[in-house]
């Protein structure tokens, strides 16, 4: 288990109950605000798929679509289709269902570890995490400037499973167009088990934090903007290396384009020593309603 209570929450989400051979369920407390957090459902579908896969195969590619908002008050059923079991590659399709309707589906490819050619891009040259303020400290500075208290903005200071130290600062109460990229150092608030299934599920869980934010920044809006509707539409992730997330890692995100009420972002996740450990992409709804 985790060292701190804040990390227990996502780890508990990974404890799915087996209903039948390829059917699993989650009957615990969902996380999110008004609707189930997308990272939760993504991580849980990965866990469900792993329960049907040979332990020698590990996920390398995850592609998904958010179809309907998840109801915070209801359980989720996960059904796994065994598309293919091969010597090197295994494929699974997973659906998350509430009230008989699919709210999320994904395809996951697993592969045995192999030797081969290697190449990767360099990690961005950014300040070290020890030289930066945490996201919480930056938000406290903003409230002091506005002469407000934490109690006035409870969602602004909700407990996180991770500590984030952004390189690029922003004032959420004074939104402005920013360059279409962001870099954030991340560290767990606790210790994750040395289990690749759990490590991959956790990275998938937190990868949904900030991708759409980069697209928002590029057009000068954020989650506090009046009449803004944000929602993840799809999400893809590729795992490049064996994970060890018990230390600082860098999440660098860029948003190449925003148009037609959709923002597109892609992220690269680097270990502290510069190894590219995972990549992801996401398209999200950015809709500003009239008054």
Image: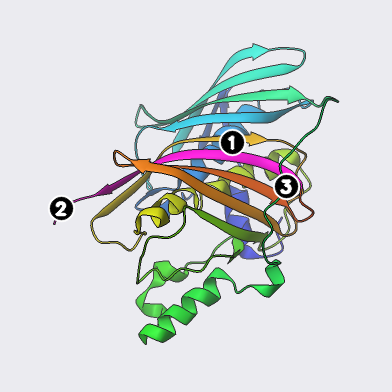
In the visual, does 98 lie left or right of 42? left
Q: Which mark is residue 279?
A: none
In the image, residue 94 lies in the stretch drawn in magenta? no
Badge nearest the viewer, 1 or 3: 3
Q: Secondary structure at mark 1?
A: strand
Q: Quadrant of residue 283?
A: top left
Q: Residue at x 48, y 81 (%)?
A: 141
- Label 2, on which residue? 290
- Label 3, on which residue? 122
Q: Position of residue 268 (x, y in %)?
A: 62, 45
Majority SS type along the magenta span:
strand
Q: Nearer the viewer, residue 68 or 80?
A: 68
Q: Position of residue 247 (x, y in %)?
A: 75, 59
- Label 1, on which residue? 237
Q: CA distance from mark 1 to mark 3?
A: 19 Å
Q: Is residue 148 visible?
A: no
Q: Residue at x 44, y 31 (%)?
A: 65
The reply to whether callout 1 and callout 3 are in contact (CB within 8 Å) is no
Is 4 above or below relative to 33?
A: below
Q: Quadrant of residue 3?
A: bottom right
Q: CA distance from mark 2 to mark 3?
A: 43 Å
First in sequence, mark 1 or 2: give its number: 1
Q: Quadrant of residue 14?
A: top right
First in sequence, mark 1 or 3: give its number: 3
In the image, residue 289 lies in the stretch drawn in magenta? yes
Residues in magenta, as a range: 275-291
Q: Secondary structure at mark 2?
A: loop
Q: Secondary structure at mark 3?
A: loop
């Amino acid at each position: 288990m985790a060292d701190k209570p804040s990390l227990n929450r996502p780890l508990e989400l990974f404890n799915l109950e087996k209903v039948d051979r390829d059917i699993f369920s989650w009957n615990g407390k969902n996380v999110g605000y008004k609707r189930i957090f997308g990272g939760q459902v993504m991580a849980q579908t990965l866990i469900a798929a792993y329960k049907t896969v040979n332990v020698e195969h590990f996920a390398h590619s995850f592609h998904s679509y958010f179809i309907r908002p998840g109801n915070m008050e209801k359980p989720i059923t996960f059904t796994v289709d065994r598309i293919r079991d091969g010597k090197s590659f295994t494929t699974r399709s997973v659906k998350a269902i509430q009230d008989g309707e699919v709210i999320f589906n994904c395809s996951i490819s697993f592969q045995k570890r192999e030797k081969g050619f290697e190449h990767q891009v360099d990690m961005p040259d950014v300040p070290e995490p020890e030289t930066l303020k945490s996201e919480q400290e930056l938000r406290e500075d903003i409230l002091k400037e506005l002469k407000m208290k934490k109690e006035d903005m409870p969602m602004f200071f909700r407990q996180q499973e991770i500590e984030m130290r952004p390189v690029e600062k922003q004032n959420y109460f004074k939104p402005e167009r920013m360059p279409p990229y962001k870099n954030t150092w991340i560290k767990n608030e606790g210790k994750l088990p040395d289990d690749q299934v759990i490590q991959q599920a956790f990275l998938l869980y937190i990868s949904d934090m900030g991708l759409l934010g980069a697209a928002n920044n590029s057009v000068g809006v954020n989650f506090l903007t009046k009449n803004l509707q944000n929602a993840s539409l799809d999400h893809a992730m590729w795992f490049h290396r064996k994970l060890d997330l018990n230390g600082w890692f860098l999440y660098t995100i860029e948003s190449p384009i925003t148009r037609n009420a959709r923002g597109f972002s892609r992220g690269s996740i680097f270990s502290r020593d510069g190894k590219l450990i995972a990549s992801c992409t996401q398209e999200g709804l950015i809709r500003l309603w009239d008054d």
